[in-house]
Image (spheres, helix red, strand yellow):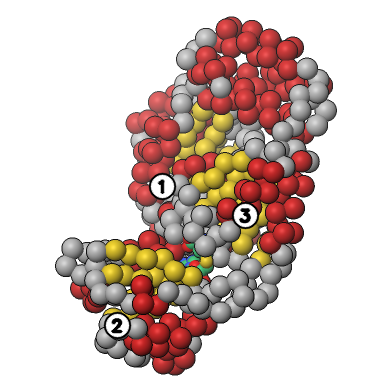
C-alpha cells in the first residue's frame, strides 16, 4: 500500500493553497466544501479565485510565496506552475510535518487527493497513488453509475435509527442482519426514490415487529474462488465474500482473491497440501456446521470450482444433514483458467472434440484410471493433481496407444502473475517436470490443442504486477 486512505475533518481548520490559477481554484473549492478556512498565497489570482476572494470566502495574501506564510496550516497544497516554488513548499511543509500535496508531482506529495464520489455523508474515494489520475477518474465514473444518488439520504436514515436499533438488538450479528435486510430491501428503495416519510414509517414498523430476539441464522456460502486472478471471480462470489463473518479458505485460494474478503472477517486456513491437511476433511465439515450454528455467515472459499475436484459435494452433504442453509457459487475451474491464459482452447474443431477432466491422485494415493478410454485421439485430457504421477500418466497414455509425440503442457500457478506454461510431449513431459523445477499447483494438459499455444499465447503475467 503506497498511501493510507483516511478522511479528514477540516471543519473550521486552516489550510493554505499556494498558487492562484484554475488548478488551485479547484483545490480551494474542495477544501471549502469540506468546511476548511482557506488562505491563498499568490501575487495574482485567476478569475475564479478572484471572485471567491471578492465575496470573502477565502483569505488572499497577494505576495510571492515565503515559508513564513505557511504557519498554522493543517494542510498545504502547492498548485503553482513553477516547479521550484512547488518544491520549496513541499520541502518546508515536510520540515514542519504538515501534510502537503503538490499538484501533478506525486514524488513531492505526502498525501494525494483521490477522485471522489460524494454521497455525503457517504464518500467513496479512488486513488491510483498519483500514477494515473485518468484511470482514477474512469473508475470514479464507473462507481458514479453504480452508487445511487440517494445513498446519502439512506445513510442519514440509518444514522437516525442507529441508537434505536442498538437498543432493540443486543447482539452485533442480529443488528447486522437487521440492517442488511433494511439496506438491501424495499425501505432502502423508498429512500433512494426520495420517499423519506414512507421509508421512515416502514423502518419504524420493521423495528417494532422484528422483536428483540430476531434469531441470528447462520448460513454457509460454498464459493468458487477461481484459479487465481481476482478478476475472474463472479459478482456473486465477491458479494458473498464481502458479506461473510468468517472465511474458511484453502491453500489454492490466491492471496489477491483472499484480499477481497471483508476486512474484518475472521479467516481460518483449512490447508490441503498433498498429504498435509491443516484440518482433516471431517474437521472442516464439522467446523462449517459449528460456525453456522453460532449464527455466523460462513464463506467456505475454495480454489477454482467447488464442484470440480473440490470436495464441495461432501461439505454440503454434511450441511444438508444438519439443516444448515447454504448456497453454492461456481467458480472458474483451473482447466478453463489455465488453458485460456496459456492461449490454447480446450476443444477445437480441427483438433479436439471433447475434453476430459481427470484427477491424477486418488484417495488411496494411486492413479488407477481407465487408460484405454483416455488414450483416444482427437480429445483433450486435463489432469488435476497430476504432477506427482506425471511419469505414470505419460507412460500409460503411450502404452495404451497415444503417440509419444502427442503434445502436452504443464501450466503452473495459472492466471496469476507467476503463470508459467511449459510445452513438451508425452515423451518429454516427465523430464521437463524434473528439470524445470515445476511446483504445485500445476495442471497437465494433453492433446493436439496444446500446439496452439505457440500461435495464440496472449497473456503476459508480468502485466499483473
Ligand atoms: N476445485 C479446483 C481444483 C482442486 S484440485 C478447480 O476447480 O480448479 C487441485 C489441483 O487443481 C491442483 O493440484 C492443480 O492441478 C489444479 N490447480 C488449481 N489451481 C491451479 C492453478 N491456478 N494453476 C494450475 N493448476 C491449478
The answer to whether residue 182 is visible is yes
Tell me where residue 449 appears, x and y as whole percent.
25, 72
Relative vertical location of residue 150 with respect to residue 257 in this rendering, above or below: above
Name the image quarter holding the N terminus. Answer: bottom right
In terms of secondary structure, where does tag 2 sit? loop
The local crowd at label 2, few if under 14, some if 14 to 19, many if 20 or more residues have their Cα within 10 Å, is: some
Residue where numbered disc 2 is placed: 402
In terms of secondary structure, where does tag 1 sit? helix
Name the image quarter holding the C terminus. Answer: bottom left
- Which is nearer the N-term, disc 3 or disc 1? 1
Residue where numbered disc 3 is placed: 314
- Residue occupying the point 38% across, 39% down: 142
| Residue 465 placement, left or right of 375 | right
In-front residue for pair 134/288: 288
- Which is nearer the N-term, disc 1 or disc 2? 1
Residue where numbered disc 1 is placed: 136
Amino acid at each position: 500500500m503506497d498511501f493510507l486512505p483516511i478522511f479528514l475533518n477540516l471543519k473550521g481548520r486552516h489550510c493554505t493553497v499556494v498558487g492562484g490559477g484554475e488548478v488551485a481554484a479547484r483545490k480551494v473549492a474542495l477544501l471549502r466544501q469540506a468546511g476548511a478556512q482557506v488562505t491563498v498565497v499568490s501575487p495574482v489570482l485567476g478569475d475564479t479565485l478572484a471572485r471567491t476572494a471578492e465575496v470573502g470566502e477565502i483569505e488572499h495574501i497577494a505576495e510571492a510565496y515565503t515559508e513564513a506564510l505557511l504557519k498554522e496550516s493543517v494542510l498545504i497544497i502547492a498548485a503553482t506552475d513553477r516547479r521550484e516554488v512547488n518544491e520549496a513548499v513541499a520541502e518546508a511543509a515536510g520540515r514542519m510535518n504538515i501534510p502537503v500535496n503538490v499538484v501533478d508531482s506525486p514524488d513531492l506529495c505526502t498525501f494525494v487527493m483521490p477522485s471522489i464520489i460524494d454521497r455525503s455523508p457517504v464518500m467513496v474515494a479512488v486513488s491510483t497513488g498519483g500514477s494515473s489520475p485518468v484511470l482514477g477518474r474512469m473508475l470514479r465514473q464507473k462507481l458514479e453509475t453504480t452508487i445511487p444518488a440517494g445513498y446519502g439520504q439512506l445513510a442519514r436514515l440509518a444514522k437516525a435509527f442507529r441508537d434505536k436499533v442498538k437498543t432493540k438488538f443486543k447482539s452485533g450479528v442480529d443488528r447486522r442482519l437487521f440492517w442488511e435486510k433494511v439496506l438491501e430491501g424495499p425501505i432502502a428503495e423508498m429512500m433512494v426514490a426520495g420517499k423519506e416519510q414512507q421509508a421512515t414509517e416502514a423502518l419504524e414498523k420493521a423495528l417494532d415487529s422484528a422483536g428483540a430476539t430476531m434469531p441470528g441464522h447462520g448460513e454457509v456460502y460454498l464459493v468458487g474462488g477461481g484459479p487465481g486472478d481476482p478478476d475472474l471471480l463472479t459478482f456473486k462470489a465477491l458479494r458473498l465474500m464481502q458479506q461473510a463473518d468468517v472465511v474458511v479458505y484453502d491453500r489454492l485460494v490466491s492471496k489477491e482473491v483472499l484480499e477481497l474478503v471483508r476486512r474484518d472477517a475472521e479467516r481460518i486456513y483449512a490447508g490441503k497440501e498433498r498429504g498435509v491437511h491443516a484440518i482433516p476433511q471431517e474437521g472442516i465439515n464439522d467446523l462449517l456446521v459449528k460456525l453456522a450454528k453460532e449464527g455466523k455467515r460462513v464463506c467456505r472459499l475454495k480454489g477454482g470450482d467447488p464442484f470440480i475436484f473440490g470436495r464441495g459435494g461432501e461439505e454440503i452433504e454434511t450441511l444438508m444433514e444438519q439443516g444448515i442453509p447454504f448456497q453454492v457459487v461456481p467458480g472458474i475451474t483451473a482447466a478453463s483458467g489455465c488453458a485460456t491464459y496459456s492461449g490454447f482452447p480446450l476443444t477445437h474443431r480441427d483438433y479436439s472434440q471433447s475434453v476430459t477432466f481427470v484427477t491424477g491422485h486418488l484417495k488411496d494415493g494411486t492413479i488407477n484410471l481407465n487408460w484405454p478410454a483416455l488414450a483416444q485421439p482427437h480429445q483433450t485430457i486435463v489432469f488435476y493433481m497430476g504432477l506427482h504421477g506425471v511419469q505414470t500418466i505419460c507412460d500409460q497414455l503411450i502404452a495404451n496407444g497415444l503417440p509419444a509425440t502427442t503434445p502436452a503442457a504443464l501450466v503452473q500457478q495459472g492466471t496469476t502473475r507467476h503463470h508459467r506454461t511449459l510445452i513438451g510431449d508425452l515423451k518429454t513431459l516427465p523430464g521437463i517436470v524434473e528439470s524445470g523445477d515445476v511446483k504445485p499447483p500445476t495442471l497437465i494438459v494433453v492433446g493436439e490443442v496444446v500446439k496452439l499455444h505457440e500461435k495464440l499465447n496472449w497473456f503476459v503475467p508480468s502485466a499483473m504486477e
